[in-house]
Amino acid sequence: MAHTLRLILGDQLNSQHSWFTNTDPDVSYLMMEMRQETDYVNHHIQKVVGFFLAMRHFAKELKQQGHRVIYFLLDDPDNQQSLAAQLPLLIENEGLTRFEYQIPDEFRLDQLLQSTCASLGIPCQAVDTEHFLTSREFLNDFFKGKKTFLMETFYREMRKKYQVLMDGKEPITGQWNYDQDNRQSLKDKSLLKKAYTHPKQVHELCAMLEKSGVKTIGNIDAEQFPWPTSRQESLEVLAYFCEELLEHFGAYQDALTTWDPFLFHSRLSFSLNSKMLSPLEVVQAVEAHWMANQHKVGIAQVEGFIRQIIGWREYMRGIYWAKMPEFAQLNFFGHERKLPHWFWTGKTKMNCLSQSIGQSLDLGYAHHIQRLMVTGNFALLAGIHPDEVDQWYLGIYIDAIEWVEITNTRGMSQFADGGIVGTKPYVSSANYIKKQGNYCSSCAYQADKKTGEGSCPFNSLYWHFHARNRELLEKNPRIGMVYRTWDKMGNQQELIDQAEYYLERLEGL
């Protein structure tokens, strides 16, 4: 009798997948906690704990539904710690005659599974994860013959295809995008709400990781691990976002403040990227809440969130599969510097970086503006090698999986792709950071000072970046004004000298 083994990876926890519609005694599901996955990058401890907890919960649910599950804990003596080593043993020991897997979202794992299947000696089949709204190939096909892949065009196509905030072929309000309404700084502390958490004790799991010698970064509260690690918990976070946070999400999604790390952000990215929730159900829940509460929730709040999910998230995945593996080697500016050591401690006198990095180390989380316009902005201005930046972002955030991390980091944040993802480098002086929140008010550096003692490094580094990359950037139509301003400035050399002083002393900033 045929016996099939089906692999479920740690980011494939989709309980709605058609695999699970019926139970079959001749089908076994394989889940593994592997050193192959804990060790390919130095992960945040909350990321490892989060994935392992979610995997264990998922396996338990499958067993309760009557499915046969083979689950290897990390410290199981029979755990070979890699798929290439484990699968041949299972085939032999279990008398398996067929192997199936859901297509991975990482190029690394896609290549590994294809090569492993070629040597297994039994029929193998890859199936879709039934999670994303587009196929791997969709974006590349959609923009065939075009030099640039414009996200807004793709986003509108997704809105039409899935009839989200639409009236037939037109947006329900007559306007597609409310981005200009989504850039406010938070002035009123009383608007803030507590984050919805699922505190759980993780002492045993932390002890296992330590005993196994798994190297991690960051901090964890083993008494109060806060992240959702099941579909039910994820649905509760989604409901809380709609009821309590959505009405202010759009307006303050770019805000920077020391008052609260989460603001009005949904905290659903881990649930989405592990596939406990699907993007369509999240978007439809948010749309339905808005439809029923238009007196309370403005369209700009809702559209800004939906654009991130069915626009940006799907777009980034499409870029990944259109451009990998070459994308991972791109270094448009030829940057070579290493990350300062304080990226691993948060101990810098620059308050915006201290806050954003410290929060990342404590929570495994930072919102998109902290990632793009604080840590990413600094790394780009300072000329840090994209490999260094990639490794840091991939390791430190609980939601970081390469398909979404590398496109945001090497593409959007570092412009190492030369403009595939973004139309210009996302860099700024201290002025932007000051405008977006209160980080600058308690900093050792002065946001308004461009040179001299106590001048904010972002100011001189901003002009140094543009000056040294003029040949590469000057013809970009979105940057022309920067160079026209630069050419009129009488303190060019002073700014260059100040920036070089800081670049030589990055570790002490």
Image (cartoon, helix red, strand yellow):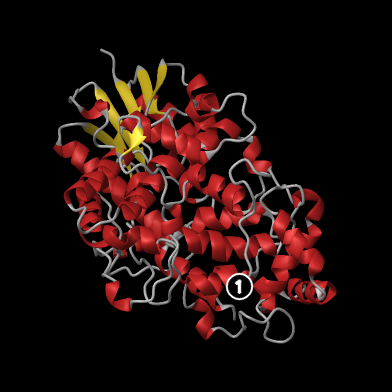
Above-or-below relation of 206 to 164? below
**Observer able to see residue 129:** no
Quarter occupied by residue 100: top left
Identify which residue, 195 or 431, lies in the foreground.
431
Q: Is residue 424 left or right of residue 234?
A: right
> Neighbour class for label 1 at 10 Å: few (<14), some, many (≥20)?
many
**Residue 158, percent from left and from top:** 39, 34
In the displayed structure, 32 sits above or below 429; it is above
Q: Is residue 385 left or right of residue 33?
A: right
Could you tell me how many numbered marks the image carries? 1
The residue sitting at the top extreme is 1
Q: Residue furthest right?
A: 493
Q: Amino acid at mark 1?
A: Ala
Helix, strand or loop at disc 1?
helix
Quarter holding residue 1: top left
| Residue labelled with disc 1 | 430
